[in-house]
Image (cartoon, helix red, strand yellow):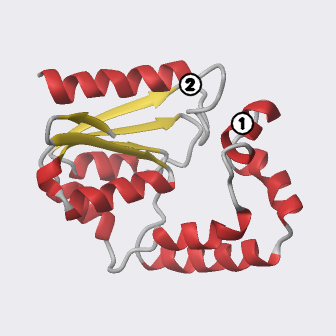
Amino acid sequence: CIRDSINAEYGGYSLGGYVAMLVAREYPELCCGLALGGCCNEYFGAVANILNDIIGIVIKMTPDSNLWKAVPYAFGKGIPRDALNEAFLRSGLNYERWSECIALMKETQAGEYLSIIKDFDGPILFINGSADYRSAEVLFSKSAKEPRVSVVDGGNHLVFIDPIKRDLFNQAVMDFADVVFFS
């Protein structure tokens, strides 16, 4: 969250992007911009809810040690293990809570997140790695009133912690903050 007096630019990555959209919907008077990273996939609506239920069940049934082995393949292929450790293990990621986190992405009604994007009056940055799950990026950006799209070439879902790509990601977010507050 980047704050300027009463208004703030809310942002989030992956699950955090969906949370930022919910905050913007609930408190539009406080939100002057949205930076949404890693949350432009097509799994919204009924399909997402079914997929999230299945993922939640699998996560609950899988020992933590095996989940950890899956993280680099699912989200961070090519990112050094120490960067993954720093971002996830040392920050206190609790695998037992993954199913609850995934449940937060479920829509209470079909098209909920798309309608939040359509109704939001400020600029929205959609930022993703080129190798991330981006199947709804065009739909989301065309639905926004003031869209900005930034794609970090060669980045995957964990582009924000990739030692080689994170500076490009951070610069795009800071450039967007300049647009929100200074133009």
Task: List x then y, in percent, for residue 152.
Answer: 50, 27
Q: Amino acid at mark 1?
A: Glu
Q: Residue at x 85, y 52 (%)?
A: 69
Q: Residue at x 15, y 35 (%)?
A: 5
Q: Secondary structure at mark 2?
A: helix
Task: List x then y, in percent, for residue 67.
Answer: 80, 60
Whether residue 168 is visible here, answered yes or no, is: yes
Q: Secondary structure at mark 1?
A: helix
Image quarter of residue 32 = top left
Mark 2 touching mark 1, by CB under 8 A?
Answer: no
Q: Is residue 82 above or below residue 21?
A: above
Comparing marks 2 and 1, which lies closer to the viewer?
1
Q: Is residue 11 above or below residue 57?
A: above
Q: Amino acid at mark 2?
A: Arg
The C terminus: image quadrant? top left
Task: List x then y, in percent, for residue 173.
Answer: 37, 28
Q: Is residue 105 above or below residue 149?
A: below
The label on residue 166 is 2
Task: List x then y, in percent, for residue 114.
Answer: 29, 62
Camera-side residue of 118 and 20 = 20
The residue singled out by tag 1 in the image is: 86
**Label 2, label 1: how many angstroms apart (C-alpha)?**
14 Å
Q: Residue at x 45, y 53 (%)?
A: 16
